[in-house]
Amino acid sequence: MKKIKFLMMAAVALITAMSFTACGDDDDDKTVNNNYTVYQNAVNQTVKAQKKNSKAILLVAFGSTWQQAYDAFDETVSAYKAAFQGYDVYLSFSSAICINRAAAGENVAPRNFYAPPFWLTAFAQPDIQYKEIVVQSLQVIPGEEYTRVINYIKDFANNANGDIDDNYLANVTLKLGVPLLQDAEKDVTAVATALNALYASKSAEGVVAFMGHGNPDSYDTYKANVRYTQLEDALQKYNKNYYVGTVDMKENFKTHVLARMQANGIKSGKVFCHPLMSIDGDHGHNDMAGDDDAWDNGFEANEEGEVEDTSWKMYFSHMGYECNNSTMIEKGLLELPTIRQIWMNHTKDAISGEPLDFYHSKNPE
């Protein structure tokens, strides 16, 4: 359903990214450079005002423009501050589109979020210079967006812009907390156990269908999409009513979830839908629980087998299931303390582990 939207957003993101890196002599380039300086100064001042410790944790989320998501992020920052005494905690967005739309006040009051490079550069300023920096990915799978997180740290460590003191970089300790489902066995098992503890009663009533994001094949970095299949397998050890689909993984759209349900003899009954994303944002409110409906005495699937322009709610409803507003479980994973704790455990593991070997030790096999 979101393929066209994805391509449009990617194009806008590319243009936005170019606007932050372009250089030249004309007036537009001067404006871009001036904007970059304004943003960096704003982050520098924020860090100076909030700095209390010699160590920092930077949480990196994709981003959102929904108040429910902002509340989840704020709650997460508070939880981190309570759990990690001696660390200053900051939040960043990696999506230029989300950053720009948040600043413009889409859906909610305007709010400024900044990309990770601004925060990392601020941490290295002469009058700040944190001795230890822990970057925690708030991604669910170790896929495309997690790759961006790794690359932010690489660029910082390698002084890509040449504006950081090399002596500082030689002595600062860098650490990286991995995504929720980094490990195929330990993390998948832990998440399945926590989700079943929360939704066992719902799975006794009907299907509980989790909607992840997923990556198109061309963006399936580290083949991370397999985590969704592994999680469904782990959940089904508790109850065959658990299913895990996505909005962007080939052969795992809502249509494929339906096929697996029917192959298991589930032809009717309740279908509870739940975002398998860090927050309940645009995908949760629209792709999962929205009212988009392309039904016209039937559905026509695209070449990948997906029914576009139709939410999970409307799709399963038309397929004969009890799936409506009352069966939507609109909670992001960061809103679930037992799931959020798994991310926090990754942060603890990063802190207690060796200084960051950000390529060899943090890329999934």
Image (tube, grey):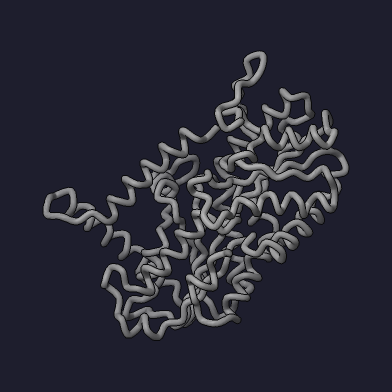
Towards the viewer: 209 or 74: 209
The percent position of residue 116, horizontal first and vertical second, equals 42, 63
Q: Looking at this rendering, what residue extends furthest in the left direction?
A: 25
Quadrant in the picture for residue 125: bottom left
Question: Would residue 203 be found to the left or right of residue 81 on screen?
Answer: right
Question: Would residue 93 be found to the left or right of residue 243 on screen?
Answer: left
| Relative to 243, residue 339 above or below | below
Q: Quick check: can you spot residue 142?
A: yes
| Quadrant of the drawing holding the N terminus | top right
The percent position of residue 27, horizontal first and vertical second, equals 14, 49
Quadrant in the picture for residue 274: top right
Q: Quick check: can you spot residue 52?
A: no
Counting the numbered discs, the total is 0
Q: Determine the residue positioned at 35% across, 47% down.
A: 14
Q: Determine the residue positioned at 50% across, 54% down.
A: 144
Question: Would residue 14 be found to the left or right of residue 347 on screen?
Answer: left
Question: Would residue 118 be found to the left or right of residue 141 on screen?
Answer: left
The percent position of residue 25, horizontal first and vertical second, equals 11, 54
| Relative to 120, residue 320 above or below | above
The percent position of residue 201, horizontal first and vertical second, equals 86, 47
Quadrant in the picture for residue 308: top right
| Relative to 141, residue 3 above or below | above
Q: Looking at this rendering, what residue extends furthest in the top direction?
A: 297
Q: Determine the residue positioned at 69% across, 49% down.
A: 229
Q: Determine the residue positioned at 22% across, 57% down.
A: 34
Q: Looking at this rendering, what residue extends furthest in the right direction?
A: 204
Towards the viewer: 330 or 345: 345
| Quadrant of the drawing holding the C terminus | bottom right
| Relative to 30, residue 318 above or below | above
Towards the viewer: 281 or 152: 152
